[in-house]
Image: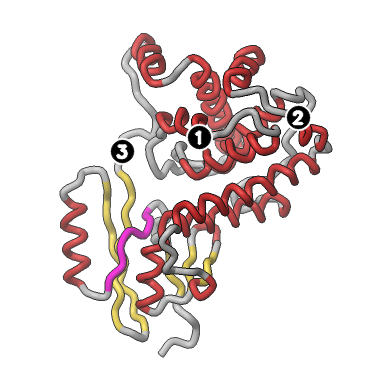
Amino acid sequence: MTDTPPVLPLHNPADNRFSLRFISDTKQDLSKKKSQLSNKSTVETIHVEESLDKGIIYLLYTRPLFETAFPTFETHDDVIEWFTANFSGRDRQVLFAIIDIFDGILTEKENLGADISMYKKMDLEKIPDILNRVEWRQLVPDVGAELLSYFILAHPMPNTNHRTGIGLLDRYLTSYDGGFAMPATGEADQWYKWAREFIYHSKRILTLRNQLPLLRWAHQYGYECAERKEGIQITLEEIDLDRADYRSYYANRHLDRTRKFVETALEEADATHLRQETDDGKRAFGDRLRKNA
């Protein structure tokens, strides 16, 4: 009998590039799942055995396999052809801004000597869907919240999706007020308090949206808490693990929390006048980005 409630590690403690994919109390089920995944050349697996009060639990972790996180092209013409085929002109302006933001984050980390791990391939094809989901021509803070929330939920970048999304929000708000500057948020593991509350809550919501069925099984096997990277914990007793509409429910929760973050950012930046601005559409945003490029 353990003295402390068991905590489910959502990332492999030995290598956090591996995320929990499957959980079972039988070795046969583990072997079956590993066999299914072994037929795919796109993932690597590793499993861990844990001893709980109810017996041995088998945790299967996976990580995506890829040669490079970024699109590769042989010639400049190939680059132009790919962008033209996959993105409209104004979507390309937003895409170029996102790539510029992401590149700036990586450069900053490299200059600080930080280790940069890419845990999946860049998925730039998600960008048009993100932009099409946004309901433009609302009040600027509402559009900014949707832009940031949908970007984070889609997770198109190989790393630093929250920082890249906040950078995109900064570009959007700056396009309405050239004097706007996103207040400093800190960075991973050192987020400033006003931003950390949003970042950590956002990651909890993402976990619940993406892994609620897995957490339901974990609770049945005896886990009382789940922990993801950065020490972010989720107490399973506090969650409705049987919620059928969990994906839409947590997407809406994420958007509500992001609205609060945008409001706080405007207050921190002394830019509350932007609350009264009405967005003039995706096309106009793309045009402003091109003009300011």
Amino acid type shown at disc 3: Phe
Viewer-proximal residue, 34 or 136?
Answer: 136
Q: Which of the two discs, 1 and 3, labels the residue nearer the N terminus?
A: 3
* Whole-percent x, y for residue 214 in the image: 37, 64
Viewer-proximal residue, 284 or 235?
Answer: 284
Disc nearest the viewer among 2 and 3? 2
Q: Which of the two discs, 2 and 1, labels the residue nearer the N terminus?
A: 1
Amino acid type shown at disc 1: Arg
Cβ atoms under marks 2 and 1 closer than 8 Å = no
- The kind of secondary structure element at disc 2 is loop
Disc nearest the viewer among 1 and 3? 1
Which colour scheme appears in the figure? secondary structure
Query: Residue drawn 20% across and 46% down?
Result: 40
* Whole-percent x, y for residue 10 in the image: 42, 62
Which residue bears the numbered disc 1? 133
Q: Which of the two discs, 2 and 3, labels the residue nearer the N terminus?
A: 3
Look at the image and tell me in which quarter the C terminus lies. top right
Cβ atoms under marks 1 and 3 closer than 8 Å = no
Q: Is the magenta stretch mostly helix, strand or loop?
A: strand
| 241 lies above or below 175 | below
* Whole-percent x, y for residue 168 in the image: 60, 32
Distance in Å between CA atoms under marks 1 and 3 = 29 Å
Residue 66 tag number: 3
Residue 277 tag number: 2
The quarter of the picture where residue 232 lies is: bottom right
Residue 231 tag number: none
> Magenta residues?
18-24
